[in-house]
Image (tube, helix red, strand yellow):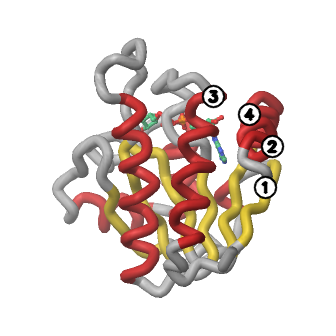
Amino acid sequence: MAGKITLVEGDITKLAVDAIVNAANPSLLGGGGVDGAIHRAAGPGLLAECKTLGGCPTGEARITAGHRLPARCVIHTVGPVWRGGGRGEPGLLASCYRRCFRLAREHGIRTVAFPAISTGVYGFPKDQAAAIAIREIQRALAENVGIIEVLLVCFNPETKKAYEAALAGTGE
Ligand code: AR6
């Protein structure tokens, strides 16, 4: 495999990687959860840049500079709100990861950190989200998109357990 997956605990805003991923909403103008933390740490320049983007549909992604963050870039993606699983949520979540990797390749990003997209306020079950994340990340690494390391940030113990189970299921 061309790149590796690493689980890390803690706050994504502290990571000095090429890009951190933000679990945003379609306005791209900030919110709670990891989105709020990223905007607070990045400072007002990030909001100003986001205002120029005109929002982002669910399942897509947009890229900005990192402003005051240690990360060079922020990839903002909009995960689906969980509505029981029958409204295309799994496909939309997979699309978030694919769009993030597409942007990463276009921008020469070699190290990228993801939060557990959609598993907070948006209510996506953590185990299902972790399985989708691992599958899409392994696919991107196998396609050799230029990434050398994907960090999966575990903000709570349940998220870490879900990733560990998903990785065990794939023989990683
Ligand atoms: N570092 C890493 N992970 C974090 C951090 C952090 N600093 N803070 C929270 N998490 P959420 P969503 C984890 O709710 O479900 C916002 O208001 C959190 O524990 O941030 O995609 C947006 O504007 C969880 O595991 O994102 C949208 O309106 C994961 O990040 C909405 O929330 C995602 O939780 C998006 O909801």
User: Residue 62, labelled with which disc?
Assistant: none
Q: Position of residue 124 (x, y in %)?
A: 51, 25
Which residue is farthest bottom? 108
Marker disc for residue 162: 4
- Numbered label attached to residue 168: 2
The Cα atoms of the two marked residues, 3 and 4, are separated by 6 Å
**Mark 3 lies within 8 Å of ligand 1 (Cβ measured):** yes
Asked if marks 4 and 2 touch (Cβ < 8 Å), the reply is: no
Residue 70: name its quadrant.
bottom right
Residue occupied by mark 3 = 126
> Mark 3 Cα within 10 Å, few/some/many (few <14, many 20+)?
many
Against 81, residue 60 (above or below) is below
Query: Label 3 to label 2, Cα distance in Å?
Result: 15 Å
Q: Are marks 3 and 4 in contact (CB under 8 Å)?
A: yes
Q: Nearer the viewer, residue 117 or 38?
A: 117
Label at residue 172: 1
Residue 73 visible (yes or no):
yes
> Label 1's element?
loop
For badge 1, the amino acid type reads Glu
CA gap between label 4 and label 2 equals 10 Å
What residue sits 21% from the left and 62% below the top?
53
> Looking at the image, which residue sits at the far top?
84
